[in-house]
Amino acid sequence: MAEQTAVAQLAAAMGDEPAPIYQRVKQAIISQIREGHWKANQRVPSESELVNELGVSRMTINRALRELTSEGFLVRMQGVGTFVAEMKGYTAMLEVHNIADEIAQRGHRHSCKVLSIGQMKADPEQAAVLGLSTGQTLYHSLIVHYENDMPVQLEDRLVNPLVAPDYLSQDYHQLTPYTYLMRVAPLTAGEHIVEAVLPDLRQRKHLALDEHEPCLLIRRQTWSDNKIVTYARLLYPGSRYKLLGRFRGHG
């Protein structure tokens, strides 16, 4: 019933302006969002429903929804549906923060899913980023973080067991890796590398992304005193997150 109402609202908002049909569909959807008729996180009608009710082609609807997603008005979750986007969350670019705290500050609910956690033997690349020897034991975890049940970060983390020996025994549904690591090895230095990437199939599945949707990747290495604590690859859907940095000038 709600989706039928949404389609009826959209049809009424389309009008008959002399513009390409996909543009009229886009503007009608934007109008519904800006006027508050379609709320953040509300599921929008499917392509089939829009095609049938609006009497336009699937290609037209697909183009409109695809462009609205790239422009940040909608979020498309593979296998789930298309939803009205919230204002993008942000993560601090020049600082290290707990993602659970960032989400709570926006008045939202954080949850996570631990995909894997365990120990492994360091290959040469992994050994280098943790300051270990090749073949030495390291800890690894792969966790998806959710904001109001929507995946917003895939955390792929390597941990130095000499600095955080109890890393594997923590319940990361109750606390984040950040919380534990800051407790046992307080941060004294960190390094960020930020880039735009296209996620692979596995990453798209974990973050419920459409094919070709870009992501922000932060590669983060942290130290406590002179010891490397952790090396993390933090992957954020580009349509759901942005980076924020603050600095002070002179004068």
Image (cartoon, rainbow, N blue to C red):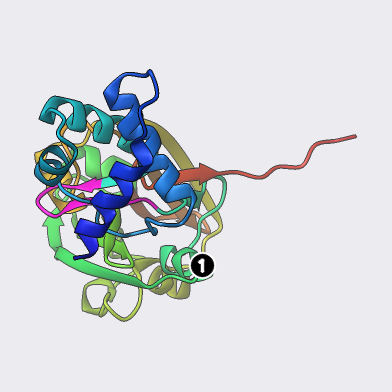
Task: Give the magenta range.
Answer: 76-85
169 w.r.t. 43: above or below: below
Tell me the amino acid under the disc marked 1: Pro
Image quadrant for the N terminus? Answer: bottom left
Which element is circle 1 on?
loop
- Front-most of 71 and 222? 71
Is 140 a magenta residue? Answer: no
Is 81 a magenta residue? Answer: yes
Question: Which picture quadrant has residue 227?
Answer: bottom left
52 w.r.t. 223: above or below: above
At x 26% / y 77%, what residue is drawn?
173
Q: Is residue 143 visible?
A: no
Q: Position of residue 118 (x, y in %)?
A: 14, 65
In screen coordinates, is 203 left or right of 214?
left
In screen coordinates, is 96 left or right of 6?
right
Question: Which picture quadrant has residue 14?
Answer: top left
The residue that disc 1 covers is: 186
Q: Position of residue 184 (x, y in %)?
A: 43, 74
- Front-most of 178 and 34? 34
At x 45% / y 65%, what residue is drawn?
103
Give the prevailing secondary structure in the magenta stretch: strand
- Front-most of 214 and 182? 214
Image quadrant for the C terminus? Answer: top right
In screen coordinates, is 202 left or right of 190?
left
Q: Position of residue 164 (x, y in %)?
A: 34, 69
Q: Position of residue 23 (x, y in %)?
A: 34, 25
126 w.r.t. 58: above or below: below
